Structure formats: structure tokens, C-alpha cells
Amino acid sequence: MLEKQPFRIYGKPELLSSSLVVGWSEDAGKLGPKVIGYLREKLGGKGFGEIEPPDFFPLGGVSVEEDVVQFPESKFYCCEGENLVLFLSNSPRSEWYRFLNSVLDVAEHYCQAKEVYTVGSIVSLSAHTVPRRLLGIASSLEMKKVLRQYDMAVDMDYETPPGQRPTLGSFLLWLANMRNIAAASIWVPVPFYLVSTDDPWAWRKVVEFLDNRLSLGIDFTDLDEKVARQDEKMAEVRNRFPELNEYIRRLEKNLGLTMEESEKLTRKIEELLKKRD
């Protein structure tokens, strides 16, 4: 008897040699959801499938955010005009190998995907005034050459610490390489005190790369307005609160903060930005 597939397809995307972009809901600063959500809205992405949760998520307990139950979701969207597939998911709690292979099964067999990109962020100790930069990890030397064309740092050395699991992105790159699908993980450092709020500079950086690489033809006017509003908010915070301004000024000079100062800066920035919104 054939094993039941853990995914459900309810659409027929007309795609050929498409690109898949993957984001994880638990990403620091919500960069993955922001990028996927922006592309979906901007390009008119339509849902066509999902990975069903019972095999990969503990449904005995779900999280609640702002009085709303958060059920795990793993959904595919297609933007046919741009030959693009988007996948946004909670991070699976078990059976990573089967889950990620299911993602690639959908991408390869239903969308004829030729390349895969995962997007995410890492927490940075830099100030928000430091220009965001892209960090790239490629699945092959050929893909590494591609990433070099886009002003991206691709010469990082990293090894998973003993006893720890690799990241989902790294695991997905390995599986994609086994299938001869080009793949890369794209990361942007996000200032630690913006992780719990928003960093439009970071997701603009990722969207700009994808727009250039995949010829999406995106009009950045709305995203530039979000960036400008964030810059305005942060400038106002610095003008009104000298202590916070001093913390940020020290970060700009690569001077460290104490744990207490870092926590205070993070707490106050979150409070002030949400109040301003």
C-alpha cells in the first residue's frame, strides 16, 4: 500500500522552472513572515496547498497570542506571473527529514522548482543606523558564484556545535542538493532591540535581492515609505529620550552595553514604537 502523502494540494499552479522562497514563522524579528507576506500581497500569490500538521506538530497544546489561538500552518502560494512559489510555515517539532522532503516534493513535482531560497534573520548587536547586509549560505559552488553577484557575504565558516541540530535552513539546503536543486539561505542581521517589533530595513534588503535575482518587477514605493516611517519613529525616540540615545550612540561606536542596559533599551523601544503605532 502506498504511504499517504502528508500534504494536500487543492490547486494546479501553471509553473515551469520556478523558484521557491521559504520563510519560518518563528524567525527573529518575523523577517520570514514579513517577506513572504509582502511578496504574496504584492504579487497576488494564491494558496494551492499545505502540509498537514498532525505528523509534525504537537496538537495537544497550541499557543495563544493576544487572545487568539495560533494553530500551526504550513502553506504554499503561487505567483504564476512571476513563476514564483512561496512557502510559509511554523517550524516542525518532529520528523524534520520527512517534513522538508515534503516541501521539496511539492516544489519539484507540482511546481517544477529549479532553485530554493530560505530567508531569515539573525540577532545583531549593531545599532539600527548600521546598513543592513545580506549573508548567504549556498548549497554548491555554482550557487555561491551566483550569490556573489548580489553584494552578499558568502565566505562564512560555521559548524553545528556537537550535540545540536543544524538549522532548518541548512537541513533544507542539504536535501535540495541531494535532489540537484540549487539552493541558498539568505540572512540579514536585525538589531537586537528591534527583534520584538519590526525592522523594515531588513526585509527590504531581502525583497530587493529576490527582486533582482528573480526579475519580479516590484515597485518599492510602499516599502520605502515603511522604512521612512521607521526611521522617523527612531529619530523621535532618540530626541525625546537622551538615555536611549546614549545607548544607541554607544552601539554606533561599537561600544558594548551591559545586560541591564540592553534589556532596558529593548523594552523601551518596543513600548515606544508600539505606542506610536
Image (spheres, rainbow, N blue to C red):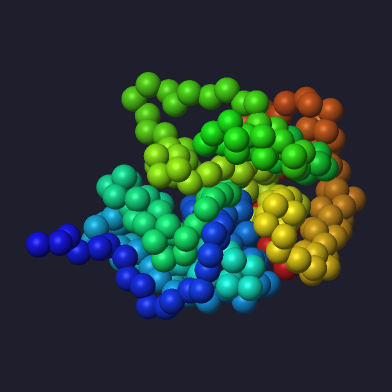
Q: Is residue 31 above or below residue 154?
A: below
Q: Quadrant of the N terminus?
A: bottom left
Q: Residue 253 sits in which quadrant?
A: top right
Furthest-right residue in this view: 239
Identity of the residue furthest to the left in this view: 1
**Is residue 53 rendered to the left or right of residue 48?**
left
User: Which quadrant is home to the C terminus?
Assistant: bottom right
Q: Residue at x 42, y 57 (%)?
A: 108
Q: Position of residue 276 (x, y in %)?
A: 76, 65
Between residue 237 and residue 184, name the one nearer to us. Answer: 184
Q: Position of residue 185 (x, y in %)?
A: 56, 42
Residue 4 visible to the viewer:
yes
Residues 200 and 242: in front is 200
Foreground residue among 259 and 113? 113
Q: Quadrant of residue 59?
A: bottom left
Figure quadrant of residue 152: top right
**Residue 170: x %, y % from top left:** 47, 38
**Where in the figure is residue 164, as x and y percent of width and height?**
37, 29
